[in-house]
Image (cartoon, grey):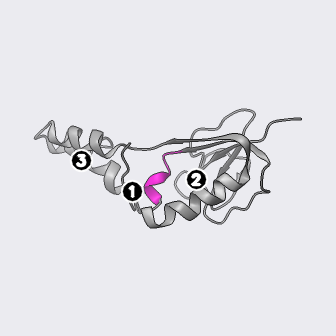
């Protein structure tokens, strides 16, 4: 039986042999297999082997996290895997504090990681391990 692997909010990271899903709001020219709002997406329970969620957690407030994760975990088969990659608050703080140069402080590793920028505004939270 073929594995079902979901790359949620894929953005610019299209993965071969995965189902790549995005709503293309940030990247109008991206490649994906399914256009969907990740928050509204439904999937059959116990059918997914792997889920990747890369650089999307900043759009999830801690109060929303439990219900969001419950939904994702319900899709996973037994021993399925959810992999999350997100910005690290402590690393961002170290980056900001390492310089007095506004260009470094405000760049994508600094303040923009906290608040977003032109095409990624709307960040709700910054996580750390």
Which disc, if any, is residue 106?
3
Q: Is residue 67 visible?
A: yes
Can residue 3 be found in the magenta stretch? no
Residue 30 located left or right of residue 106: right
- Percent position of residue 63, x then y: 45, 67
Can residue 61 be seen here? The reply is no
Which comes before the other along the chain, label 2 or label 1?
2
Q: Secondary structure at mark 3?
A: loop
Looking at the image, is 66 positioned above or below residue 128?
below
Where is 46 relative to 15, above or below?
A: below
Residue appearing at x 47%, y 60% in the figure: 60
Q: Earlier in the sequence, mark 3 or mark 1?
A: 3
Q: Percent position (x, y) of residue 7?
A: 65, 43
From mark 3 to mark 1, how far is it between C-alphas? Answer: 13 Å
Q: Is residue 1 above or below residue 123?
A: above
Q: Residue at 56% x, 59% y: name it.
A: 25
Do callouts 2 and 1 mark residues in contact (Cβ within 8 Å)? no
In this figure, which residue is indicated by the disc labeled 1? Answer: 118
Q: Position of residue 2 (x, y in %)?
A: 85, 35
Foreground pick, 29 / 32: 32
Give the foreground label among 3 and 1: 3
For marks 3 and 2, give the one nearer the viewer: 3
Name the outermost residue toward the front: 78
Is label 3 in contact with label 2 (beta carbons under 8 Å)?
no
Would you call the spot at circle 2 few (<14 residues within 10 Å), some (14-19), or many (20 or more)? few
Sequence-first disc among 3 and 2: 2
Res. 28 mark = 2
> Are there few (<14), some (14-19), or many (20+) residues within 10 Å of tag 3?
some
Q: In the rendered structure, which segment of residues is drawn in magenta?
A: 54-59
Based on the picture, tell me whether residue 57 belongs to the magenta stretch: yes
Q: Residue at x 89, y 35 (%)?
A: 1
In whole angstroms, how far apart are the C-alphas of marks 2 and 1? 13 Å
């Amino acid at each position: 039986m073929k594995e079902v692997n979901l790359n949620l909010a894929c953005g610019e990271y299209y993965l071969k042999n995965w189902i790549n899903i995005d709503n293309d709001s940030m990247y109008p020219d991206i490649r994906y297999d399914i256009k969907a709002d990740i928050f509204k997406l439904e999937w059959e329970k116990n059918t997914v082997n792997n889920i990747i969620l890369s650089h999307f957690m900043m759009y999830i407030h801690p109060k929303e996290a439990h219900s969001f994760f419950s939904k994702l975990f319900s899709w996973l088969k037994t021993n399925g895997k959810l992999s999350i990659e997100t910005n690290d608050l402590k690393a961002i703080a170290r980056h900001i504090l390492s310089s007095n140069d506004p260009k470094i402080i405000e760049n994508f590793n600094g303040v923009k990681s906290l608040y977003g920028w032109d095409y990624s505004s709307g960040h709700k939270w910054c996580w750390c391990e």
